[in-house]
Amino acid sequence: MTKSTQGEETFISHLIELRDRLVKASIGIALVCITLMIWPGPSQIYDFIARPMIAALPVGSKMIATGVISPFLVPMKVTLVISIILALPWVLYQLWAFVAPGLYAHEKRLIAPLVISSSVLFMSGVAFCYFLVFGRVFQFIAEFSPQSIAVTPDIENYLDFVMSMCLAFGATFEVPVVVVILVRMGLVSVAKLKEIRPYAIVGAFVVAAIVTPPDAVSMFSLAIPMCLLFELGLLVAPLFVRISTAPEEKA
């Protein structure tokens, strides 16, 4: 058997392994989605997501649906997105299982904690956005709205806003993971990151101003956690580097 034939077989085996991992990840998401559709159900899930907005509206007010199939389609979309978020640890595990055979032992000690911490941080960002940010933002908007305007949000526009905000908070909560990866790959040192701390703080506020609505409450709600998470990354990066360094690298 020639080297080229062996290379082709290895490449094909990797493709088959990747396909199997993608199928397993999709099955995990599908099982979570089916479970959520059975209980508590798409309608109850959307009611839960809409609770911060409804609480900020006048008593008895509701959101509206301008599309014919929006009352059916929007709750289904919400259920699917929630399923992906809940199945994220399983999806990341499949990714880890695909790349793990090609890693050294010291590299595996880094990948597993990163997979777990990435899932926890992303979910923490989404939870922080829903439980702490939405209520304040919607209340601020309702108080700022003139009395001559009847605030009746459309359910599709509300879903787009909620999903974009949750995605922004979930992604920005990954700052410690990004810091650890940059330090471990040798692209930047912890000392250098500490030197550019003032620029990182300014960058956090710039990012927050871009991805959040144009109000101070949303901006500070995102920028301050980003700064704190940046400091957390500076604290844990040396530990991750130490436990994931090969013996020959230490020597």
Image: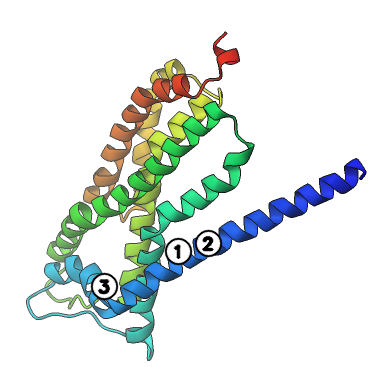
Graded by Cα atoms within 10 Å as few (under 14), some (14 to 19) or many (20 or more), the crowding at tag 3 reads: some
Q: Could you give the CA–CA distance between mark 3 and mark 2, rounded to whole angstroms?
A: 25 Å
Q: Quadrant of residue 85 in the image?
A: bottom left
Amino acid type assigned to the residue bearing label 1 in the image: Gly
Number of the label disc, if any, that sits on residue 28: 1
Task: Write down the residue under mark 2.
Answer: 24
Residue at 21% over, 53% down: 133
Q: Could you give the CA–CA distance between mark 1 and mark 2, rounded to whole angstroms?
A: 6 Å
- Quick one: label 3 or label 1, which is nearer the N terminus? 1
Foreground pick, 134 / 93 = 93
Q: How far from the left and from the top, in percent, is residue 107?
A: 54, 30
Does 178 appear above or below 45?
Answer: above
Amino acid type assigned to the residue bearing label 2 in the image: Lys
Q: Quadrant of residue 138 in the image?
A: bottom left
Graded by Cα atoms within 10 Å as few (under 14), some (14 to 19) or many (20 or more), the crowding at tag 2 reads: some
Task: Write down the residue under mark 3.
Answer: 45
Q: How far from the left and from the top, in percent, is residue 165?
A: 34, 57
Residue at the outermost front position: 1
Q: Is residue 250 left or right of residue 87?
A: right
Q: Quadrant of residue 151 in the image?
A: bottom left
Dot 2 falls on a residue whose secondary structure is helix
Amino acid type assigned to the residue bearing label 3 in the image: Ile
Q: How far from the left and from the top, in percent, is residue 145?
A: 17, 67
Foreground pick, 20 / 118 = 20
Answer whether labels 1 and 2 touch (C-beta < 8 Å).
yes
